[in-house]
Image (spheres, rainbow, N blue to C red):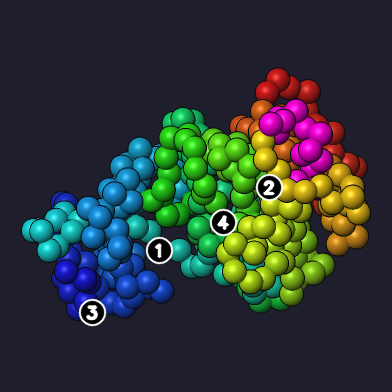
Amino acid sequence: MPINEGDELIGEHGKKYLAVSPLGQSNVWTAVETPNNKVVVVKEPDANDASRGMPSFQNEMVMHELLKDSSGIRQQLDRIPSTGPRDPPMLVLEITATTLWGARTQRPFTLEEVKKTTKDALIGLRDVHAQGLVYADLKMQNVMVDGFDGSSAGSKAGTEDLHASLGDLGIVSEPMKGTVQPVSYRAPEVYFKKDITPKADIWGWGLIYCHLLEARKRFEHTGLYDETSGSLAKRENATSHAIANDYGLHSNLSYSGVPLPQNDAAKHAGDQWELLRRRGLEEGEVNFLRWVLKADPLQRPSATQILESGWLDKTDAEVAQGFQPPRQAY
């Protein structure tokens, strides 16, 4: 049965939780652990998933157990076991203040905040990938954030209390063929070859990083490959055309023999980098993104390689000195 206000829920080890209010979705609620009044999040399968036997929710439970030691994954605190066919199991999760998207809409991030939140999210991806899995649904709304002060004064506070982690593990899976990822974060190999591997997550991560950098100067705009409107099909078509032209896929051996959109003679491969410079990105950041956003996933760095490059620990002054891609095998 759906969660209702005032429901008392009993965890696996006897802890009691009192349901308080829905948290944006009918299957996700805030609750209070009694008697210590600790606020938590309780999540049950949504109606559509429940009608199909809860495959997504069951997968999420497995993934939380598998990734329970990762600092880059939103933590599971407890589980509420099923008490019958009409009462599904539930997850008890740590509550966070907002999402990366919620924080991004409050004010421009400082460079330090961009690097701290995206580094935390990348640690989560690294740990997912270390299990041979793909996160597959990376977007700002699925990155949970604590310690972000949205006031103008908050931009001077530093990042000591700032932390991000990946939430919503429902479609984490093994590499496969198919279509995943939000339109604007979808990797070229997913668009054109239906290849879903950990490197597709890296593409999505790179665009999140790029969008946060862009928002420092263009706060009211979304960012690269995220400014089309209309139906899903229209946005997919516009984004896939832009990617094919920007990255010169018609002459990229990795995409030979793959149906591609018509080549636009008015566009030239690499135009997107000059566009980002005009949007205020530092030269070092542009070169870092050129290293991350490789059209050929085999040439794209892994989460571990990005972390080991040290770029996400650079200060403003160090960024101004530029970025040199590490010499490493892929």
Which callout, 1 or 2, points at the residue further toward the start of the chain? 1
- Pointer 4 residue: 182
How far apart, in angstroms, are the residues tagged by discs 1 and 4? 24 Å
Label 4 Cα neighbours within 10 Å, binned few <14 / some 14-19 / many ≥20: some
Image spot of residue 296 (x, y percent): 70, 33
Q: Of the numbered discs in the image, which one, if any, rests on residue 10? A: none
Disc 3 or disc 2, which is closer to the eye?
2
- Pointer 1 residue: 95
Q: In the figure, is residue 145 to the left or right of 208?
A: left
Q: Reply above or below: 65 against 161.
A: above
Assess whether mark 2 and mark 4 are in contact (beta carbons under 8 angstroms): no
**Amino acid on which the number 3 mark rests in the picture:** Glu
- Pointer 3 residue: 5
Disc 3 or disc 4, which is closer to the eye?
4
Would you say the magenta stretch is mainly helix, strand or loop? helix
How far apart, in angstroms, are the residues tagged by discs 4 and 2? 14 Å
- Pointer 2 residue: 206
Q: Which residues are magenta?
A: 243-257
Image spot of residue 57 (x, y percent): 30, 53
How far apart, in angstroms, are the residues tagged by discs 3 and 2? 40 Å
